[in-house]
Image (cartoon, helix red, strand yellow):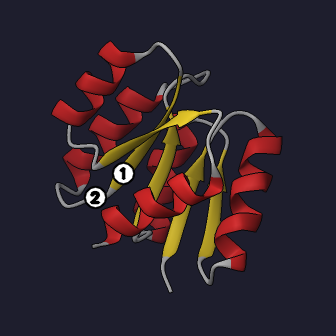
Amino acid sequence: MAKILIVDDAEFLRVRISKMLVSNGHQVIEAENGAVAVNSYKTNRPDAVLMDVTMPEMDGLAALKAIRTGDPNARVVMLTALGQESVVLEAIKSGAKDFVVKPFEPARVLAAITKALG
């Protein structure tokens, strides 16, 4: 189906999301922070990105802006912890297609990816 870039500094979360997406027919690429994600996006040109907001080196908002500068049509879904509403608004203004609040239900992640790809 689609090639999805998963960006989160928590390896267990990347693995959990990867398994879910692969079992639903998607191909997965992983990155552990925003800086790696920006480079991986340029190299791999994924169909969508699922990106955490809070990460070391380069946070998700900065990575979102960098990716969208290079590709204004990039489809990015943000992963956010509860209580980060202002960050979510900033992400949407910066071009994020959707956001998923952690902890999340797998169906919510799949719905956000489907919406971004649509």
Q: Nearer the viewer, residue 112 or 78?
A: 112
Residue type at numbered disc 1: Val
Image vertical order of residue 35 relative to residue 15, above or below:
above
- Residue 110 left/right relative to 28: left
Q: Residues within 10 Å of mark 2 (few under 14, many from 20)?
A: many
The residue identified by callout 2 is 74
Q: Nearer the viewer, residue 18 or 73?
A: 18
The answer to whether mark 2 and mark 1 are in CB contact below 8 A is yes
Q: Residues within 10 Å of mark 1 (few under 14, many from 20)?
A: many
The residue identified by callout 1 is 76
Q: Quadrant of the C terminus?
A: bottom left
C-alpha gap between disc 2 and disc 1: 6 Å
Image vertical order of residue 117 relative to residue 92, above or below:
below
Disc 1, SS: strand
Residue 85 place in picture, x, y as percent: 35, 17
Q: Nearer the viewer, residue 113 or 15?
A: 113
- Residue 56 left/right relative to 37: right
- Residue 105 left/right relative to 96: right
Residue 56 place in picture, x, y as percent: 62, 21
- Residue 13 left/right relative to 59: right
State the residue at coordinates (27%, 50%).
97
State the residue at coordinates (52%, 63%).
110
State the residue at coordinates (42%, 56%).
112
Residue 93 occupies quadrant: top left
Q: Nearer the viewer, residue 63 or 81?
A: 81
Residue 61 place in picture, x, y as percent: 37, 28
Residue 55 place in picture, x, y as percent: 59, 24
In the rendering, which numbered label is found on residue 21?
none
Disc 2, SS: loop
